Amino acid sequence: MDETDERYDVVVVGVGGMGSATAFHLADRGHDVLGLERYDVPHARGSSHGITRIIRRAYYEHPSYIPLVERAYDLWDDLAERTGRPVIHRTGSVDAGPQGDVVFEGSRRSCEEHDIPHEVLTGAEVNDRFPGYDLPAEYRALYQPDGGFVVPEQAIIGHVRAAQAAGAEIRARESVRDWAETPDGGVRVWTDRGTYVADGLVLAAGAWNAKLADALDGLAVPERQVLAWFQPETPALFDPDAFPVWNLATPEGRFYGLPVYDVPGFKLGKYHHLGEGVDPDDHETEPSRADELLLRDFAGKYFPEGAGPTMRLATCMFTNSPDEHFVLDTLPEHPQVAVGAGFSGHGFKFASVVGEVLADLAVDGESEHPIDMFGLDRFE
């Protein structure tokens, strides 16, 4: 080891949602941790921002996520108690679409398999109960009262401050250039400011992960995403106590939205917005008029009282795996390197437990959490 190299137990690359949680869990277990972030902590250049992010127990993507989301809820509540920063705001959640669509059917299946309290409603019943909605009367909807939103910037700040209090070192505005295995089975990490050596490495760099690990080429693909905040014509209908978070399948695509919180406007987006694969270092970050109109047309049809003046537009990035399920594993040829990637637009709610999983993988090479379906070997 070069005399100028600083030594740690684990280096965490990326201090967004997943990386901040990982740094905290490692430090809380007594490990000597360095977290490296190329931008600010927190920042709005990747996937871990946007004021509010949906959390829901009803999980149409696959019932196997339920144990992880249950643990995530507990850990978010633990973080709030530890830091004094509220993280989860419970509004209820609605997953709706035409009868037979996966959004409704998958949500019902996950609730039934895991005994999660829920109600099945028609679109007309949703509209009566929550007048901010205007769903087709024949749509089917699953309402789950524990759904709501996580506040991402505050969650990252909470994890970072808790990690620092436990002894972690966090460095922002420091970009990782490369890494390599050392002769003793550890890793050396080069940045634009220094060189570090550690026993283990965690890659939690979001849209930049594939640039740091060849094994993720084609398995963690960045995509440009756009969000809008529209000022409601009837603001009271879109307050958190009157307007559940939602996922909605329609002929126009699959959309999601949240109540007014902290900044003006009711928030919504379309999954895989325009299907634009991007280079995270070179893409259009300014929303366009076409981006806005796509979301405004949808809001005007299904949430007409919410489709008032535009308050805010923002871009972020999904990082998609081929099957849109997570990648939580160690690299096949580098077992000392743990990877959290491919969260495919539905990962932030899990950040608290993903941090716990990645800490397990970084230190032990395995986790007791049910992560078999998230292994890299499924793509072989």
Image: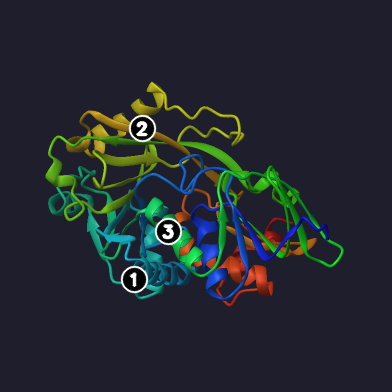
Could you tell me which secondary element the residue under label 3 belongs to? Answer: helix
C-alpha separation, residue under disc 2 versus residue under disc 3: 22 Å
Q: Position of residue 32 (x, y in %)?
A: 63, 68
Quarter of the C terminus within the rendering: bottom right
C-alpha separation, residue under disc 1 versus residue under disc 3: 18 Å
Residue that numbered label 1 is attached to: 81
What type is the residue that disc 1 sits on?
Glu
Could you tell me which secondary element the residue under label 2 belongs to? Answer: strand
Q: Earlier in the sequence, mark 2 or mark 3?
A: 2
How many other residues sit within 10 Å of disc 3, few (<14), some (14-19) or many (≥20)?
many
Which quadrant would residue 265 be assigned to in this image?
Answer: top left
1 and 3 marks in contact (CB < 8 Å)? no
Write the residue at 27% across / 49% down. Answer: 139
What type is the residue that disc 2 sits on?
Leu
Could you tell me which secondary element the residue under label 1 belongs to? Answer: helix
What type is the residue that disc 3 sits on?
Lys
Q: Residue furthest front?
A: 3
Q: Earlier in the sequence, mark 1 or mark 2?
A: 1
Q: Residue furthest right?
A: 183
Residue that numbered label 3 is attached to: 349
